[in-house]
Amino acid sequence: MAGAVWGEYLTYIRPNIFLVILVNVNMVLMCILGRKGTIAGPVIGSVLIVAFNEFFVATLGASEINILATGLIMMLCLMFFPLGIVGMLARHRKLPQILNWD
C-alpha cells in the first residue's frame, strides 16, 4: 500500500527510485521508531520521521548533515527505545487506547 501511495505522490514510477538507500533507510527507521510488528507503530514512526526530516531540511538544509541527523535519530532510538515508541508506551501502560491496534 505504501508503494502505491508513493507512486501516486510522485505521479510516475521508475525502478531506480526505490533503489536509493535513503528511501529504504527511512522505511526501516519508520518501523523501528514506532514499533515493528504492530499496526500503529509504523504509522507513528512515519509521522515522526517526516516531521524530523522536514525540521532538519528547514534548519540544516538539504545536505549530508541532514542524512547524519537521520542516522543519529536511528542510533538513539535503538539505544533508548529498543521496543520503539509504541512498545515503550505499552510497556509502561501509557499507550492511549486509540493507538492500541494489536
Image (cartoon, rainbow, N blue to C red):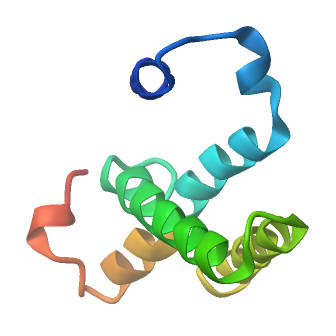
Visible in this render: residue 34? no
Visible in this render: residue 60? yes
| 101 is higher (above) or lower (below) than 15 | below
Q: Is residue 66 left or right of residue 40?
A: right
| 9 is higher (above) or lower (below) than 16 | below
Residue 40: image location, x then y, percent: 31, 55
Residue 12: image location, x then y, percent: 54, 12
Quarter of the image where one finds residue 96: bottom left
Q: Is residue 58 left or right of residue 95?
A: right
Quadrant (top left/top right/bottom left/bottom right) for the N terminus: top left
Q: Residue at x 70, y 77 (%)?
A: 73
Q: Please name whichever residue, 8 or 25, is drawn nearer the observer in this view of the structure.
A: 8
Q: Please name whichever residue, 54 or 20, is drawn nearer the observer in this view of the structure.
A: 54
Residue 59: image location, x then y, percent: 64, 83
Q: Residue at x 84, y 65 (%)?
A: 63
Q: Is residue 99 left or right of residue 37?
A: left
Q: Is residue 21 left or right of residue 36?
A: right
* Residue found at the far right of this picture: 64
Number of marks drawn: 0
Q: Residue at x 59, y 60 (%)?
A: 32
Quarter of the image where one finds residue 100: bottom left
Residue 22: image location, x then y, percent: 77, 46
| 66 is higher (above) or lower (below) than 93 | above
Q: Residue at x 37, y 62 (%)?
A: 44
